[in-house]
Image (spheres, rainbow, N blue to C red):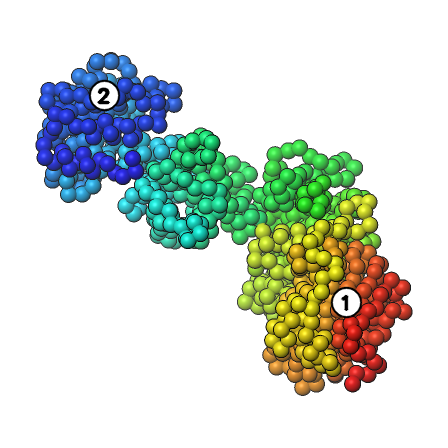
């Protein structure tokens, strides 16, 4: 019965006290039907309507007795008390509850009304077997309000103000009982919202807000295809709860910011007929609503109509999961009280308050569906071995694990060694314990022939009164092992998961930024790599920026200079980039290279029909309607036309500034994983004010210093792993004074060296023009495994014409 049916009874009671009132039975059935309700009956005693029934709560048989009357009949010697005691006396000693619906036309405000009822009820001769008395005050001008009275430990009756305004069984449906481990204080909130300030009895530092509400209607809104667009009543209930939490946090100023583990609990009265796809649509609605409210979870409970199972109670939980964002799960309703923070949860919270993720919280995301994760630590001989212990009991500021993630291409799982800095231990500061584990992790990855995956967060070498410069020696030892590992062909992939200071950025550079390295480095908006933090630079008189992100963040520094290869909006996005990288590069131990993926794209497909746009309608027109091959075209479109259409492509170094004339992609051709390099074939405007000794625009088909560096790094990264495919419209290297000043010769030479040292097949395809120095660095004489092809009508010469 979703509507507040007590209002119907209040209207009838305004016309006088009836001898028969079926609404008493209706309300008992509404509130107790989920608790083994039996023996419900309506009664008339001395010309007054009443009702009673039996129900069972937590295996305790209980009797409910209900009647009605006027406020002037509430005295201990009045008819209402006489009727209630008479009914209770018929089965003396049995646990019971009493519900009264009282007409009070000129009822005062609720505090005064509660005090008056408390005074009247204190004289009633009720035994200890009566657990509570509920009084619904029917004013006839406003909606009836429930007031609940219980006996205190001193034996006096007092109002339970925590649930003022709602029936106790509704409060139970809203899971108020789950707060038994907390001292609870009711706070002001919008109508139909219960808001509680909860302080854990066992941990006073654990303080949170819990908002509760009811949903009396669903009325789903769907589009013309039947897809769920929204549930306005449910969304409004959640929004009201969130607004109550936001107001309370704002009113408490800076202290309110620490209220960041808050809960919203909603009970839905109507039967819910939604499938899992509908729940996913709700997730997209709930996620933005919770911003700025410090929400731990939104929990919605109700009765679901499940095919083949009938109507069963279920709970939908929307909660933030580190590494995955807001997720939705459908489970049985909660059966345990809300637990106060323990030591582990406290660490999770401390990390969150710093805008970071506690590494153990990423376990499920790293392993993936069906995957495994095993924590590793040092044994007596200094080797990493599996350990069985509770999460959060690591003794060092870095956590090690062996992770295996199954994928369709690798059902047995892609195995990696994973390292993660612990933000709760000196903000990931490094000394001997951390460096020993880093060195041991590299040793293990080398023995297993698997990549090392590193979620970096570090405040640099540890500064402590009980340690000194030996910490720097250990940093150097770890640096040496990183260099040895990468020079031997090992792969280290870095996700910068926070602020990296001092030693850690150097480790990141040695792992991913040099010409011989194969791994990738991914940054998020919350990450930065700095040698010296902003405050230290400011105090020392050095030059800094407005914050650490201005010194070493992606947008202004690490993306444009190419040292960060990818940008991700958050940790889940960074993990998806890693998985995409592994999809193209992962080599199972004992295999020669990345596995060939099944593809439905025919190997003899004609790329001519692929749409291009602009002057050329299709890719084919680049070759048929462009006889001199001098008209501009988009190389990314050509690369997409050549690659398998049913496999994703990922562009590396997409944010690298002044490197726009070279494009590097990981893709598949015929199911084979390849590194594709394309030379941009249209002019690229320059940002800012170019120097007078350099070009105004980056000309098509030309390599400039930064684009030369990008190409050389791409070739080196693919060597020994997967084939290299170059789609060339290349007239050579830019020889302007600006380019020569910016190391054009050096980076051009790096391309030649990379081609000579490349281990694997190279396919070089001339698709337009091929002139000048490009002939040298991509000459077939540099590498016997190079195949040089040319599209019919292409031009090749020493000097272009």
Q: Position of residue 780 (x, y in %)?
A: 87, 69
Q: Are marks 1 and 2 in contact (CB under 8 Å)?
A: no
| Res. 726 mark | 1
**Residue 732 drawn at (x, y percent):** 78, 78
728 horizontally vs 759: left or right:
left
Q: Examine the image and state in which quarter residue 507 appears.
A: bottom right
Between 168 and 611, the one nearer to me in the picture:
611
Looking at the image, which residue is at 82% across and 83% down?
A: 799
The alpha-carbon separation of the residues under discs 1 and 2 comes to: 86 Å
Q: Residue at x 66, y 59 (%)?
A: 645
Left or right for 438, reference 19: right
- Does any portion of residue 60 appear in the rendered image? yes
Which quarter of the rendered picture does the C terminus lie within?
Answer: bottom right
Q: Does dot 2 land on a helix, a strand or a loop?
A: strand
Q: Quadrant of the N terminus?
A: top left
Residue 307 drawn above or below residue 691: above
For residue 708, what is the image quadrant?
Answer: bottom right
**Residue toward you, 360 or 770:** 770
Instruction: Please give the residue where the numbered disc 2 appears in the rendered image.
Output: 41
Q: Residue at x 20, y 38 (%)?
A: 7
Residue 753 drawn at (x, y percent): 84, 67
Give neighbour class at mark 2: few <14, some 14-19, many 20+ (Cα, 10 Å).
some
């Amino acid at each position: 019965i979703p509507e507040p049916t007590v209002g119907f009874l209040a209207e009838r009671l305004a016309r006088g006290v009836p001898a028969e009132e079926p609404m008493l039975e209706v309300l008992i059935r509404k509130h107790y039907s989920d608790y083994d309700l039996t023996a419900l009956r309506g009664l008339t005693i001395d010309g007054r309507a009443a009702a009673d029934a039996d129900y069972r709560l937590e295996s305790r048989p209980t009797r409910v007795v209900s009647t009605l009357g006027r406020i002037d009949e509430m005295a201990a010697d009045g008819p209402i008390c006489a009727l209630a005691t008479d009914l209770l006396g018929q089965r003396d000693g049995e646990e019971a509850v009493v519900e009264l619906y009282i007409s009070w036309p000129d009822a005062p405000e609720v505090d005064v009304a509660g005090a008056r009822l408390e005074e009247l009820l204190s004289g009633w001769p009720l035994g200890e077997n009566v657990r509570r008395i509920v009084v619904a005050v029917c004013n006839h001008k406003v909606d009836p309000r429930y007031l609940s009275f219980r006996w205190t430990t001193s034996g006096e009756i007092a109002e339970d103000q925590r649930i003022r305004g709602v029936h106790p069984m509704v409060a139970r449906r809203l899971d108020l009982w789950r707060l038994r481990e907390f001292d609870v204080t009711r706070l002001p909130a919008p109508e139909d919202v219960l808001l509680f300030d909860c302080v854990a009895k066992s941990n006073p530092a654990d303080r949170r807000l819990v908002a509760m509400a009811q949903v009396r209607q669903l009325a789903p809104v769907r589009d013309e295809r039947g897809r769920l667009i929204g549930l306005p009543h449910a969304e409004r209930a959640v929004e009201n709860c969130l607004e109550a939490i936001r107001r309370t946090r704002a009113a408490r100023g800076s202290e309110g910011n620490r209220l960041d583990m808050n809960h919203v609990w909603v009970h839905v009265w109507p039967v819910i007929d939604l499938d899992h796809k509908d729940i996913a649509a709700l997730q997209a609605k709930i996620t933005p609503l919770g911003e700025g409210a410090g929400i731990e979870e939104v929990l919605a409970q109700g009765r679901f109509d499940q095919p083949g199972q009938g109507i069963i109670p279920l709970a939908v939980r929307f909660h933030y999961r580190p590494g995955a964002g807001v997720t939705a799960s459908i489970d049985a309703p909660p059966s345990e009280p809300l637990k106060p923070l323990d030591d582990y949860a406290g660490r999770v919270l401390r990390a969150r308050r710093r805008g970071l993720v506690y590494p153990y919280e990423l376990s499920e995301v790293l392993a993936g569906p069906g995957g495994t994760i095993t924590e590793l630590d040092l044994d007596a001989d200094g080797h990493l071995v599996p350990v069985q212990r509770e999460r959060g009991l690591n003794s060092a500021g870095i956590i090690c694990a062996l992770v295996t993630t199954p994928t369709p291409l690798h059902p047995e799982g892609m195995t990696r060694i994973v390292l993660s800095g612990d933000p709760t231990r000196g903000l990931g500061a490094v000394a001997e314990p951390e460096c020993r584990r880093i060195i041991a992790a590299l040793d293990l990855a080398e023995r297993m022939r698997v990549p090392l995956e590193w979620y970096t967060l570090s405040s640099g070498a540890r500064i402590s009164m009980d340690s000194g410069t030996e910490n720097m020696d250990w940093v150097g030892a770890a640096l040496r092992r990183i260099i040895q590992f990468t020079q031997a062909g090992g792969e280290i992939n870095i996700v910068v998961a926070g602020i990296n200071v001092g030693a850690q950025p150097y480790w990141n550079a040695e792992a991913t930024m040099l010409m011989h390295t194969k791994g990738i480095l991914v940054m998020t908006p919350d990450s930065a790599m700095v040698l010296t933090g902003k405050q230290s630079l400011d105090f020392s008189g050095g030059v800094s920026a407005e914050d650490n992100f201005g010194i070493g963040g992606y947008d202004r520094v690490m993306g444009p200079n190419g040292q960060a290869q990818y940008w991700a909006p958050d940790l889940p996005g960074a993990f998806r980039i890693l998985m995409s990288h592994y999809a193209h590069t992962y080599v199972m131990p004992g295999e020669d290279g990345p596995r060939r993926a099944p593809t439905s794209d025919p190997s003899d497909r004609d790329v001519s029909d692929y749409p291009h746009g602009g002057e050329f309608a299709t890719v084919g027109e680049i070759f048929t309607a462009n006889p001199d091959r001098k008209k501009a075209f988009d190389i990314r479109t050509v690369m997409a036309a050549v690659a398998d259409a049913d496999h994703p492509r990922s562009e590396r170094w997409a944010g690298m500034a002044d490197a726009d004339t070279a494009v590097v992609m990981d893709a598949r051709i015929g199911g084979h994983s390849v590194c594709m390099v394309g030379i941009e074939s249209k002019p690229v405007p320059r940002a800012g004010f170019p120097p007078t000794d350099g070009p105004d625009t980056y000309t098509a088909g030309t390599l400039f210093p930064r684009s030369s560096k990008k190409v050389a790094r791409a070739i080196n990264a693919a060597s020994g792993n997967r084939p290299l495919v170059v789609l060339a419209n290349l007239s050579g290297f830019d020889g302007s004074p600006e380019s020569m000043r910016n190391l054009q010769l050096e980076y051009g030479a790096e391309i030649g060296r990379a081609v000579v040292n490349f281990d694997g097949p190279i396919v070089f395809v001339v698709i337009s023009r091929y002139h000048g120095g490009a002939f040298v660095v991509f000459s077939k004489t540099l590498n016997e495994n190079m195949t040089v092809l040319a599209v019919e009508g292409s031009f090749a010469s020493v000097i272009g014409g």
